[in-house]
Amino acid sequence: MEIENDGKVYQPMGHALVFHSDLIQGTNLAKSINEYNFFSYKANEALHLVGA
């Protein structure tokens, strides 16, 4: 892993929608959420975010 540092402080900004799986339990979304591969990842995978 490598981190570039040009001396400037970077403050990331953005939005995220995070919810506990109990929130959708028993709904149609809970039944079909496995069809969306975005919500499925392995523990050794990472989400890469790029700042602009």
Image (cartoon, rainbow, N blue to C red):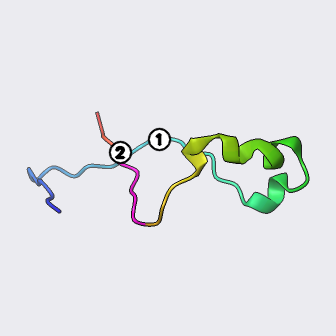
- Residue at (40%, 51%) from the top-left corner? 47
Residue that numbered label 2 is attached to:
49
Q: Which residues are magenta?
A: 44-48
Amino acid at dot 2:
Leu
Nearest the viewer among 17 and 37 is 37
Residue at horizontal 53 percent and vertical 42 percent from the top:
15
Q: Position of residue 1 (x, y in %)?
A: 17, 63
Residue 2 location (% of width, % of height): 14, 59
Q: Is residue 21 left or right of residue 42?
A: right
Secondary structure under badge 2? loop
Which amino acid is tagged 1? Answer: Gly
Q: Which mark is residue 48?
A: none
Q: Nearer the viewer, residue 4 or 43?
A: 43
Indicate left or right for 3 with 41 as reference: left
- Local SS, label 1: loop
Label 2 near label 1: C-beta < 8 Å?
yes
Q: Which residue is mark 1?
A: 14
Q: Is residue 24 among what the camera can see?
A: yes
Nearer the N terminus, badge 1 or badge 2? 1
Which of the two discs, 1 and 2, sits closer to the camera? 2
Furthest-bottom residue in this view: 43
